[in-house]
Image (tube, rainbow, N blue to C red):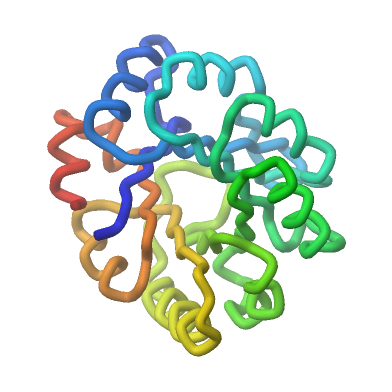
Amino acid sequence: MALIAPSMLSADFLHLEKDIRTVNSCADIFHLDIMDGVLVPNISYGFPVVEAIASKAEKPMDAHLMIIRPEKYVERFAQTGVSMLSAHLEAMEDPVSVMGQIRSYGIKAGIAFNPDIPVEKVFPYLDSCDFVLVMSVFAGFGGQKFIEATFGRVQALKAEILRRGLDVKIEVDGGVSPANSAALAEAGADILVAGSAVFRSDDPAAAVSAMR
């Protein structure tokens, strides 16, 4: 069964503790979208918000860095207590080095990539990471429509992981909802990130349950 990781980018920032309690009670992972306005068009939130979430989080935190020069911030994110940290393939000059840097802090290291990057571009780095974050929308905006080609991309990635006998998880982020969660899990996804589908639902806990 895939793990459910609500994206805190879609949380109610006026009542953030309420949404933190929701994730603690019904989901598996806090997904933290970090945007710098350079690699992606938007700016999201930084360390004060991450540290506030960390102070109340009872589930692991997964920080998705949509930023240039992610290596500059690995140590600082490690200090916040994240369990997973991913950086974008297109933002790293040396992905192997960055993944090693992340792992040196005892954190699971991930490579994220956008829908316009061929999935095969990630294959050379599968030995160096613990998970791959497949974007099913373009990084930088919440609430986008799920790209159907993601199913095939996940299947291709899963086949390569199995062929090489690797223990690499597949995370999918963008437009994930109860309508496509079962098909994504069947394709090979291990972690499903959902923002709008959870926090803009009348009953977030029921939305998480439906995705399971």
Task: Give the answer, above or below, for where 34 lies relative to 18.
Answer: below
In the rendered image, the quadrant that contains the N terminus is: bottom left
What residue lies at 37% left-to-right and 43% top-to-bottom?
Answer: 5
Task: Give the answer, above or below, for where 70 lies relative to 109.
Answer: above
Residue placed most toward the observer, 81 or 211? 81
Task: Give the answer, above or below, for where 14 lies relative to 126.
Answer: above
* Spot occupied by residue 173 in the image (x, y as percentages of width and height): 45, 54
Task: Name the residue furthest bottom.
Answer: 163
Q: Which quadrant of the structure image shows residue 42?
A: top right
> Horizontal placement of 102 versus 119: left or right?
right
Residue placed most toward the observer, 9 or 79? 79
What residue lies at 21% left-to-right and 42% top-to-bottom?
Answer: 208
* Spot occupied by residue 197 in the image (x, y as percentages of width and height): 28, 42
> Horizontal placement of 16 versus 18: left or right?
right
* Spot occupied by residue 135 in the image (x, y as percentages of width and height): 51, 60
Label tally: 0
* Spot occupied by residue 28 in the image (x, y as percentages of width and height): 33, 40
Task: Give the answer, above or below, for where 32 lies relative to 96.
Answer: above
What residue lies at 53% left-to-right and 59% top-to-bottom?
Answer: 133
> Horizontal placement of 107 versus 29: left or right?
right
What residue lies at 46% left-to-right and 42% top-to-bottom?
Answer: 142
